[in-house]
Image: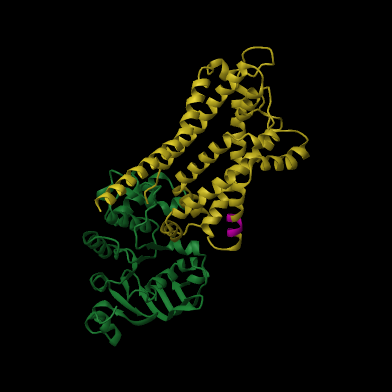
Chain colours: A yellow, B green
Amino acid sequence: MHDNVRARLAKDTIFKGIVCLFAFVSLLPLFLILYYITRNGIAVINWEFLTSLPRPTGETGGGVFNAIVGTLVLIVLSGALSIPCGIAAGVYLAEHQAGKLGNAIRLSVVVLQGTPSIVIGIIAYLWIVGPLKTFSAFSGGIALAVMMLPVIVKTTEETLKLVPYHLKEASLALGVPYYRTMLKVVLPSGMSGILTGILLSVARITGETAPLLFTAFGNQFMNVNIFKPIDSLPYRIFYYAMSPYPEWHSFAWGASFILVVLTLSLNLVARGISAKWKIQY
Amino acid sequence: MENTVLTVKDFSASFGDHQILHDINLTIERNIVAALMGPSGCGKTTLIRCVNRMHELIPGAAVSGEMLLMNEDIYDMQPIILRRKIGMVFQKPNPFPTMSIYENVVAGYKLNGIKLPKSEMDGIVERSLKNAALWGEVKDNLHRKGTFLSGGQQQRLCIARALAMNPEIILFDEPTSALDPKSTAQIEDLFVELKKTVTMLLVTHNIAQAARVSDVTAFIYLGELVEFGPTEKMFTVPKDKRTEEYLTGKFG
């Protein structure tokens, strides 16, 4: 009897140990990634790297200025396309929780979220790059917008479902038309959640490379014309890393560092917003 | 007839196949508190929601009969116009969480896009908060969020929000059922003050509250208006046996 208890206690200890071990193992990749990227990347980061353009093969130096600008242009473009659509679809879903169209939208959002990004890139290539006969920031923005859409729709829907019904009633009872009730009462009450969703979706697409290969394509030079090919950080990393030159390899680490800092801070800001701006009903 | 604010004639309401109200008839005079009492599920909330047509938010809502506000047919009016003339205070205090106390009071103007000069706005805010007996407590914090107030203060803020629109009538849907006794007493005192300027229709399932604050009482049971008359009379010599049984606590 006594031995039995001891064996059970031993199993208890082993079980706890295994849980701790695996929990630690699952944290390990993130810390290793952050460690390597910081160690290899931070040395390259300086003012010149941030503000100069890539140089041709054979010349030393160069930077990622055009890639940073390109990534920002792509974020603004894809946001401008996906945020209105995504919020509208989220509002529709929150307002029509049953119904055929609602269910159809819900299903397509899930499927879209699971669609490989390279497929979305190819579709954007066929539909936009083909007819326009040029790679462009515009087509890249559309491909990224398609990737942002599901996250925005889902978070908008979930946030608005949490906005109490009695706030909507309070507004309607004052004689406020439905559209103004939605725009001025319901959406502002859910603003922190929606904003968090937008930031997380931006963080998600900032590092996407595959959909940009066939669309924004990449550009050695500075470009802000959305109907011309444009550079982006992930593409620049890919380009530098594939080159045979050690200096360019270190540039790839530097660009990776910028990208990781960017997405990490977007995530942190998103968490801050959802905690700080939380509306107390 | 000039003193009649609300007239209800042979009014029935249903949601889908389920009939809630059967042939209700009553008239409500100006500057009184009218109580609608009855057990849960008797249709009293549905009746006041039919007055400002909020019941139409539920799919399948249908009505028959007539309802007049100041001799105008409620069901011929645009709901958004109608609802500006009828204030409503809900069971749960529901100030807008994104707005300050000040903005909450003038929410009816702000949200409807009605622009007023600042001095006029300030006047409306002060008058409404004074009428809702909240001015003294919040006058130094008008720009704080309304949700920082206590439950009873929030409910008085909602009353101020309704008063700000100068409504013909204010509908109260069990306004004190989520509040503590002290806040309840404050709001009941308020009814007596407000009676001077506005007509009130109060839904309550608290018999004592109906007795304390109302001038006339309607007793609704299973969707029918059992008895309607001066409160004092109904509580002392009820005409209907069901009223008597309800008042003496035999059911409900």
Quadrant for residue B9, please give it.
bottom left
Q: Residue at x 34, y 60 (%)?
A: B92
Closer-to-camera residue (B114/A15) = A15
> Total marks drawn?
0
x, y percent for residue A135: 73, 33
| Residue A194 vertical placement versus B229 (above, below) | above
Q: Residue furthest top?
A: A59
In the depicted structure, whether residue A232 falls above or below residue B15? above
State left or right for residue B112 relative to residue B4.
right
Image check: B205 left or right of A171? left
The relative height of residue B248 versus residue A87 in the rendered view (above or below) is below
Q: Residue A230 versus residue B239: which sits nearer the camera?
A: A230
Q: Residue A103 in magenta? A: yes
Q: Main secondary structure of the magenta part?
A: helix
The span picked out in magenta is A102-106
Whole-percent x, y for residue A101 in the image: 61, 60
Residue A249, image quadrant: top right
The residue that appears at 48% across and 52% down in the rendered structure is: A160
